[in-house]
Image (cartoon, rainbow, N blue to C red):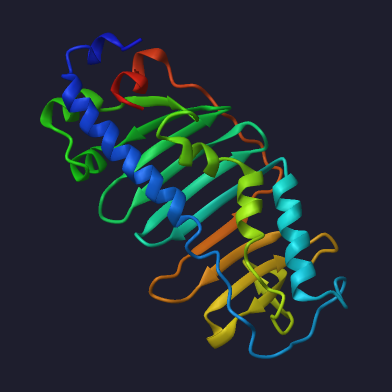
Amino acid sequence: MLGSSVRSVPRAALRVVAAGLAYVTIIVGISSCSLLHSDHATQATRTPKPLAGLSAAKIFTRAVADMGRARSVHIRGVVSQPRIRLDLRLLQSKGCVGTMAKTGHGAFGLIVIGTTVWVKPDRKFLHSIGAPPAALRKMSGKYLKSTAAGKFRPLVRLCRLRVWARLLRKVSVAQWGGVTRTTLAGRPAIMLIGTGKTGRIYVSSASEPLLLRISHRTKAGGILTFSSYGARVTLRRPPASRTIEGRRFGL
């Protein structure tokens, strides 16, 4: 049910907001795959212990599989095109909480619990999608609620660790030349390097490698980091007084 503070908003105004949000969430779903392509390595390098003898492909495959099974993971970074910034804490088989931003166009908060999604756009984001004044006034501090069956489905999928694992398995590292020792944020890591030194994949050098970072250093590239494996993530439903039912506006 609509909260009393938003009953007076013309439906046409909120439909503009709903349409704009739906468009951006679809773009987010597509953009999340944009840096998940790989280059071929230019040369072989040394594999550090305890993963000595394993190919780059096997190390990467193990790291991705472990990420897909993790209790929780913090995923953040920038994907393109267009430039979308993600900061999401995912909880296995439950959902996620975080924010997304389109460079120069504002941001929105995100909560996904099961198949239900709440999106809370900031004022700059509402301006960028052409929200009329009535919607700007009444949407302040409010969440639009929808489900996986609605137009926010790409957001629900982005909150599934198994979906991320399926996306990452599409990165072909079979012909990469090898791996090399490095450090990342002060911890020992393994780095895979692509052609022209533009592609990077980092995993921890533990016997059970954890995916740490994927980057593609080109104008159209991006970077994603994976951290806080197994950390506590709390998902809370927004109060009804701050929620607008999206199904009334085509969501």
Q: Is residue 227 visible?
A: no
What is the x, y in percent for residue 83? 36, 59
Q: Quadrant of residue 47?
A: bottom right
* Residue located farthest toward the bottom when viewing the structure as drawn: 43
Q: Nearer the viewer, residue 127 or 154?
A: 154
Side (left or right) of 9 relative to 234? left
Which image quadrant is residue 57 in?
bottom right
Classify residue 107 by image quadrant. Answer: top left
Total count of labels: 0
Above or below, 1 against 119 in this view is above
At x 23%, y 38%, the residue is 126
x, y (%) of residue 242? 35, 19
Q: Could you tell whether 227 is left or right of 8 in the image?
A: right
Measuring 18% from the left and 30% from the top, which residue is drawn there? 136
- Residue 108, x across and y down, in percent: 36, 40
Indicate the position of residue 214 as horizontal and vertical percent values.
58, 66
